[in-house]
Image (cartoon, coloured by chain):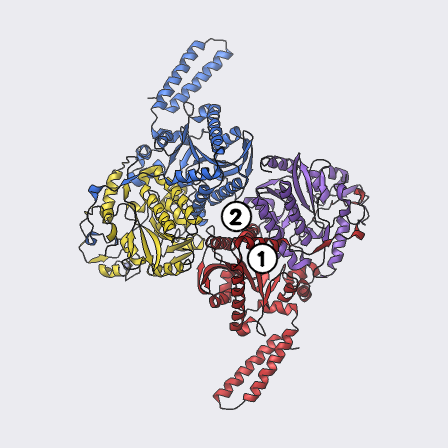
Chain colours: A red, B blue, C purple, D yellow
Amino acid sequence: MSDERTLDLLEAKIEELKQLNVMDGIDLSSEIAKLEKKLVELRRELYANLSDWERVKIARNPKRPYALDYIQTIFTGFYELHGDRMIGDDRALLTGLAQLNGQTVVIVAQQKGRSTEENKERFFGMARPQGYRKGVRAMKLAERFGFPVITFIDTPGAYPGVESEEANIGGAIAESLLTMSQLRTPILSVVIGEGGSGGALAIGVADRVLMLENAVYSVITPEGAAAILWKEKDKTKEAAAALNLTAEHLSELGLIDTVIPEPLGGAHKDFDQTVEALKASLVGFLNELRKIKLDKLLDARFKRYRSIGSYRELGVSEQEAYSEETAPSGDAPVEEAPDE
Amino acid sequence: MSDERTLDLLEAKIEELKQLNVMDGIDLSSEIAKLEKKLVELRRELYANLSDWERVKIARNPKRPYALDYIQTIFTGFYELHGDRMIGDDRALLTGLAQLNGQTVVIVAQQKGRSTEENKERFFGMARPQGYRKGVRAMKLAERFGFPVITFIDTPGAYPGVESEEANIGGAIAESLLTMSQLRTPILSVVIGEGGSGGALAIGVADRVLMLENAVYSVITPEGAAAILWKEKDKTKEAAAALNLTAEHLSELGLIDTVIPEPLGGAHKDFDQTVEALKASLVGFLNELRKIKLDKLLDARFKRYRSIGSYRELGVSEQEAYSEETAPSGDAPVEEAPDE
Amino acid sequence: MSIFKDKQYLRVNVDKVPDESLWMKCKACGELIFKRRVRENNNICPNCGEYFFLTVEERIEMLVDEDNFDNISKSIEADDPLEFVDRKSYQERVEQAQGVTGLPDAIVVGRTKINEVAVILGVMDFRFIGGSMGSVMGEQICHGMETAIADKCPFILVSSSGGARLQEGLFSLLQMAKTTAVRAKLADVGLPFISIMTYPTSGGVQASIASLGDIIIAERGAMIGFAGRRVIQHTIAQELPSNYQTDTFAFEHGAIDRVVKRDHMREELSTLLSFFAEVA
Amino acid sequence: MSIFKDKQYLRVNVDKVPDESLWMKCKACGELIFKRRVRENNNICPNCGEYFFLTVEERIEMLVDEDNFDNISKSIEADDPLEFVDRKSYQERVEQAQGVTGLPDAIVVGRTKINEVAVILGVMDFRFIGGSMGSVMGEQICHGMETAIADKCPFILVSSSGGARLQEGLFSLLQMAKTTAVRAKLADVGLPFISIMTYPTSGGVQASIASLGDIIIAERGAMIGFAGRRVIQHTIAQELPSNYQTDTFAFEHGAIDRVVKRDHMREELSTLLSFFAEVA
Ligand SMILES: [Zn+2]
Ligand SMILES: [Zn+2]
């Protein structure tokens, strides 16, 4: 089966033919039309059978639109707010005011860089404590003025460096979770690319959680899972499949509210179409949430999270008497803790 | 007139005579009694005429009891809480739980070091942003559980170093002021030594403000005022007098609630007596505050601070027409801002 | 003594052959030591002071008043929502861990007393799939906090966890939000939550419930942090300081209130609880 | 135009001889420049871009809609509670500053509009005893916020201050607490407070009201910090980085939201206010 790169090449060739068609007066229209039809078929075939790992690659594709691309098209007048008022301003996690259909919202978004230069500043979208604390500040500002909060999730995870740990990254994420779980204003979250672990969830506690069709959201990267569980690096594909990290899977599992369709080949293939679908979804949910009284909204948010989990009654057949003698002694000093 | 050092020497001599009296069987009792009487007279004379600057020196006397000395004697079971949960644990500003007459309170206290070694850790009682943020955390904990807050003020000021500014010391102080002005639990503050400027006030917004008799509380140190206003270093004495920084002055000005008497010569001359007076005052105020309903308490706290200020109506005789022509053009670039 | 006397039905079959040997070798100092002495010493090496892992039972015994633990854990165990299989199936891993630990999952929650003060206590067991937090642990922690609210008493959680349980995917990740949401309810009613971090408290547990204690106490020797050393070195190849993610590191950077030796922990809790006698 | 047309009585006598010269020398680039061009350029040197101080009138003119400023400052001036005398008496200093500035004290508060949006605006004047905050400034800031609450509109404060006014001693220090307490009321009713920090915003003003804006904007070239360079060097003899307490320093360390050029400030405020149209 053809892969995406081949199809991209074919697409480029068709473009070249079109140029030729225009410039040199040769009529290739019908051939081009056939090629275009073929391309669509091949794409459809490819994307109908996309493995979860291929989905991860689309989610990470550097051509994929990033948060600011959506913010600048869906909203008007994005006005960035900087700084956590404590130690710094994180460029991987943006906050700001903007308007959606004439109403003010607060945006909290993870932003990857496109160039190496930009990524030096944005840490590849991996936020540090000052980022999450800036997010908390922006969300509290939203609460004060009754502005809804819309968060854009797109991160491999929180930045795992010494400076992060020194400024208590775990505590910062926990504070953000706590803030969002109590925030007295509507919250919408949309996973637009990579939803990487605690660093993603930290801005993902919401009344409605949306995912773009090719976005992924996972407790750990497939690479990480392969290394820890399979102890083999080349099992990332299997890990990706096992983790159920695609929008489709997560929707089926009832863990997200909606999947925003993307054009064939991914959001970047037809950005306008993606924007239109995402905007319609955001506006729809926002209108729905605005109608709900605040206390009810918070109650529903609480119940949503309180009820998440999959477990079963302890099977009666498995229950047997337990005696102290058979208890393990737990006497082994442990050499190291697991990574995740 | 004799100064404190001379009297201390005299006191030491009397002690030596007493030793002699006991060891060698010589009876010097009546001579000793006379000397002691003389000492008390001299002290009384000295302290009745203490200049404000001499008062500053007593407030800074390294023999003077520090916060922990009071905490360990007035309260039971001081249980220190550490860390701002963000960047560090400040040893110049302590927080913790303790009990006073069987009731739990939260303590926030500035602590100077006695030795050079200790001061390396405690920055001479000058708190950094992590100190004030730890204080805010402790006060919010107090609020959650309805524990009264008691703060001990003893600092030359907030730590004025690069790392302080990097972590937004001004913002940290402002947040502390804001927290205290709204904190839904009673707050008592006592200035036990130096109340140095914004770094002191940051933990000094309270329902009742107490001062030990020889403590000082000022917008700036006398040295700083002398340098800035008099432009002469040796005008500290004049500056001290002009600033009205003693407990007596501030009480007369209505800016503090009570003055806790100290033994002749200062708190360190009879620590037990000081402790007793301070404890009685704290207990008294606490009992009084506990009886007030929370909303009324907060209302009164608001009114207390809202009404602070000394100004007068613009004098009618001074009012004259103002024309644009005479307005200054304000065209001089300024070379530097003042320090305080 | 069995701490689980009241709810035997919570136990699953333990098929592990009991270890009959009387002696063990300390991995830290190499000394051969008498097992009973180790157990009597709170699983601390009597020779070098090394802390060995405590089972949930040992941890509870160490902390609470004698014969005073009512296991209130909900009668649940891990489902397998993703039908997860790596080198082994998740189902197998759970059964194996149940066999080793005698526990349904990596946590036990109970109603108990510490020096006569009623509390709800949750204790994690690292031997159960790295003390990882999946749906069961999330639910038990919430159940513990909700019982504390009903009983009007403090909640204490002893963490020992590598983080979220990978085999339940996003279900596990979302337990961070779930436990946090219930933690907020505990705060709303003004009941204290004391978080005890032991070796290790990391990943999703450290970045949620464990870091949200009104008071956070680390057991001496605890490892505290969000991202593991390997993740950091893999991701950014950074040099790590020698005290990285130790109890001292966390303390110096203001993340925790105190560091307490294992054999002082009960006394510490007792002291701390006394301050909350009026409110809880 | 006089911005104070409505309340002439607030003015005190201005006995300073008006400066008749048409030219000035820029202290930054040394260029001789035509004063009128400087004024028309928002007091920015047309040659090198250096910002000169703005008087309160100039600042207000630059920010608000034409002929739209109602001076609502309370009709008060500094008392002298400590009867403070250094090289000069406080009374004299105040009178002199009143003469130079034509203002009763270092701040003016008014009801105005910025691009048609009603706001309460407070502006400090550094020429008035270093823009220092004494009882009058504290009262005027509170009065401004209270008027904003009554009018249900945003409050904007342009700071330019070296800190607390030393000559009123503890009265001045306590204005930090006073303004903060009223700021909390503004927050309670959900009205925005925009803090603009200009050169300089330091000491007790920076460590209270100015740092408590919902949004904090620094004018380009602002000096922002708590302790002055001299205090730091005197107290701890530390080497200071070259960008110390500059707008960039504050921005990089997360203390402020944005840095804005003087000639963009009106537009910036207009944009920012538009987000709050629903709430205020
Ligand atoms: Zn050993
Ligand atoms: Zn110039």
* Residue C2 spot, x, y in % from top left: 76, 40
The part of the image, by quadrant, that contains residue C39 is top right
Quick check: which quadrant has ligand 2?
bottom left
Assign a secondary structure to mark 1: helix
How many neighbours does mark 1 have within 10 angstroms: few (below 14), some (14-19), or many (20 or more)? many
Q: Mark 2 lies on which chain?
A: B
Callout in the foreground (1, 2): 1
Amino acid found under the numbered disc labelled 1:
Leu
Assign a secondary structure to mark 2: loop
Q: Distance between the residues labelled 1 and 2?
A: 20 Å
How many neighbours does mark 2 have within 10 angstroms: few (below 14), some (14-19), or many (20 or more)? many
> Could you tell me which residue is drawn at 60 percent across and 41 percent down?
C259
Q: In this view, does D38 lie to the left or right of A22?
A: left
Quadrant position of the C terminus of chain B in the picture: top left
* Residue A223 spot, x, y in % from top left: 64, 62
| Residue that label 2 marks | B86
* Residue C229 spot, x, y in % from top left: 62, 54
* Residue D88 spot, x, y in % from top left: 25, 38
The single residue placed furthest to the bottom in the displayed view is A26
Q: Is disc 2's CB within 8 Å of ligand 1?
A: no
| Residue that label 1 marks | A201
